[in-house]
Amino acid sequence: MSSVNTAIQLITREQAEKGAAAKGGTCSPALAKGPWDYDLAEALAGVPAYGPGASSADPAPASTPRQGQLPDEYKLASDAELGERIKAAKATLGDRAVILGHFYQRDEVIQYADFVGDSFQLANAALTRPEAEAIIFCGVHFMAETADILSTPEQAVILPNLAAGCSMADMADADSVEECWEQLEEIFGTEPDAGGRVPVIPVTYMNSSAALKAFCGEHGGIVCTSSNARTVLEWAFQRGQRVLFFPDQHLGRNTAKALGVSLDQMPMWNPRKDLGGNDQQALLDSRVILWHGFCSVHKRFSVAQIEKARADFPGVQVIVHPECPMEVVDAADSAGSTDFIKKAIAAATGPTTFAIGTEINMVNRLAAEYPQHTIFCLDPVICPCSTMYRIHPGYLAWVLEELVAGRVVNRITVDHNVQANARTALERMLAARP
Ligand code: SF4
């Protein structure tokens, strides 16, 4: 199996046998432990954390949900036993439950998924199963929220480990965005210009809380994904003089740059500073105000890694995700969403070498799916998305067996008013045309 979990176990075993770091290595030896160790560590320390992996160094907000302790029977069960229990529970539940697995999820979980895709594809996939009473989202918190917004009120959306948040989404909280908005209104006012364009249009990346999607819905704004960010920015520029883009500075910068916006018209908004750390003129001259957020997985990719890949594999095709820093996107052959990366590899006719700049679980899966190509991750150190990593088959077995027993655990529910406004922003995105 190509899974990261297996690779990590092999590396740590090799390290133990050799008494020295194995080739490549992992970003954290703690990855070989069960995620429940972090549930316990958090409970003891009283401080929420993302756990081992690429975002473990980011500070988790105090409001980050914590997972209660998983019953011992799931922690102590072997992989084979958990597999049998998951399959048995799935068979008992039948059409009553649908399991969704994100591209970045580990294979140990993905093997039980009814649908695999990016966050928005998965929320839409759930719409094709209206008979399902439970939607088990093996992804992270904002994805489960989006599924709850788009599903029927009778359907329960379940996140197997409540601590599976997203460090990027957590970098823009509703209070900080409200505060930013008030400051921008003081500078720009609220009146449209002669062309009918309002001073600012808020645009949030799908990787944000439901509260921020609702904020956009309420203030004439819109949601975007990494697949449609360009179309969405064009939509916003037709209606506004400038855009406030959150939470991912890199997706915002890469997309706006491709549209011809100059870097000096893209000030960064640091929520911890007055006026986001800008002077008033810089904001008045801006076209896109970028929130100071980023993905710790994609931030790891560098131009040096691309140069090394090109030196080691002449003719290599480098494809990166637009959450990567601008220099990395500029140095790559192409950049696009997870769907774009998948399609680019599927479209290659002859054997090709690909160096991919996105999460390791997805890269490993592509390598297994397309053995005729050489596919590897640009980052030689195995460092998966910390938060996605917190979904382990033990939690999946637990939520499924609880459903079989008639109990819904770890339900993610978005408040009714928030749902309505967030849906408005999502509907604008679906209707936006290039
Ligand atoms: S890969 Fe990055 S953006 Fe995606 S869930 Fe993980 S931390 Fe969030």
Image: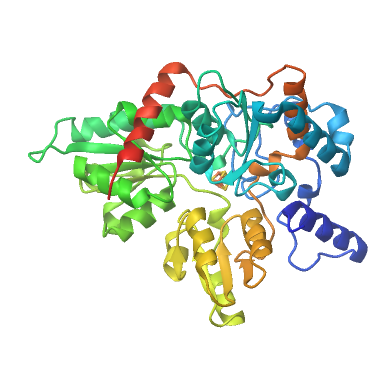
| Residue 391 at x, y percent in the picture | 70, 38
| Residue 250 at x, y percent in the picture | 43, 53
Q: Quadrant of residue 41?
A: top right
As rendered, which of 423 and 277 lies closer to the eye?
A: 423
Outermost residue toward the left? 194
Q: Is residue 160 above or below residue 156?
A: below
Q: Residue at x 35, y 33 (%)?
A: 427
Q: Quadrant of residue 306?
A: bottom right
Q: Residue at x 90, y 66 (%)?
A: 18
Q: Quadrant of ligand 1?
A: top right
| Residue 218 at x, y percent in the picture | 32, 26
As rendered, which of 255 and 52 lies closer to the eye?
A: 255
| Residue 104 at x, y percent in the picture | 62, 49
As rendered, which of 357 and 413 lies closer to the eye?
A: 413
Q: Residue at x 73, y 55 (%)?
A: 3
Q: Residue at x 53, y 55 (%)?
A: 299
Quadrant of the rendering where the N terminus is positioned: bottom right
Residue 299 in sight here: yes
Q: Is residue 148 above or below residue 193?
A: above
Across the whole image, how many numbered discs are drawn on residues?
Answer: 0
Q: Quadrant of residue 411?
A: top right
As rendered, which of 94 and 19 lies closer to the eye?
A: 94
- Left or right: residue 192 versus residue 181 is left
- Left or right: residue 396 versus residue 308 is right
**Colour scheme of the picture:** rainbow
Residue 179 in sight here: no
- Left or right: residue 334 versus residue 406 is left
- Left or right: residue 98 versus residue 205 is right
